[in-house]
Image (tube, rainbow, N blue to C red):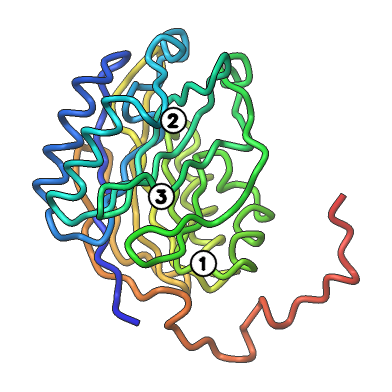
Amino acid sequence: MRTIDVAVVQEPAVAGDVAANVRRTVAILAEHSGADVVVLPELFLCGYRLDVVAGAAIGVTSAAVQELGAAAAAHDTAVVTGFAERAGDLVYNSLLCIDRTGVVAGVYRKTHLFGAECDAFEAGDRIEAIEVAGLRVGPMICFDVEFPEIARTLALSGVDLFVVSSANMHPYHHDHRVACLSRALENRTPLVYSNLVGAEAGLTFVGGSRVVSGDGEVIAECGGEVSVARCRVRPATATATDDDVDYLRHRRPELYRLT
């Protein structure tokens, strides 16, 4: 299998302004036309102001999503971006996955909400891969990456890479860097991680977006400013793992107490 051309975008969002954030996403797709997948941060289409996300929540059939789909198709580039998803009377902290054909390939709803998010969103109840750009992607959102069980569940389903959109803030930069490297290494699966930067609602987002190979090596990493990490990564399904450290093969689930 070919290597994957990923562009991991690290930018602030405009709080509550879906139209402005969609315009910026369309411009980003143009800047990285032809990439296999462009990954943007958690809640990028609405910002992380939890007091305004309900008013900025959109459905998957909305005009904003259709505009992003048209841009993805025009630039032959899949896009994964965070948004506040409106589903009837409920609002979810979700990842929108649009294929390079412009079709919505799937939506992941954050299963492990952090802090005040519990008051703003419903928690998702499914952990599963989504197929985009001919790849099986394992989606996670921010706090999710700190739980080994999520990544392991996705790895056992046979994913090519993990994709994490985040709004990680001070003082948790170290937590997420360790988690990203650990989830990649322990599952022998590459991981791409896009985080917000800037300040919003009294929070300082720490950046540190990165691409990690399946052996836990950092291939590319951003600092704390607006930037993009673009590189190629080999998918898990195309990477030979030394049998001695093939952790998935050496598992003994009959011994584990997971409840």
- Compare marks 3 and 2 and give the one earlier in the sequence: 3
Determine the CA span between mark 3 and mark 2: 29 Å
Instruction: Give x and y (percent) for residue 140.
Output: 52, 47
- Compare marks 2 and 1 and give the one earlier in the sequence: 1
Would you place residue 196 above or below residue 144 in this image? above
Helix, strand or loop under label 3: strand
* Amino acid bearing label 3: Ala
Residue contact at pointers 3 and 2, CB within 8 angstroms:
no
Residue corresponding to mark 2: 169
Q: For this view, does 128 lie left or right of residue 5?
A: right
Residue corresponding to mark 1: 159
Figure quadrant of residue 148: bottom right
Instruction: Give x and y (percent) for residue 235.
Output: 40, 73
Determine the CA span between mark 3 and mark 1: 15 Å
* Amino acid bearing label 2: Met
Query: From the viewer's perspective, is the residue at label 3 or at label 1 nearer?
Result: 3
Residue 105 is labelled as 3
Q: Residue at x 9, y 48 (%)?
A: 31
- Compare marks 3 and 1 and give the one earlier in the sequence: 3
Instruction: Give x and y (percent) for residue 98.
Output: 33, 46
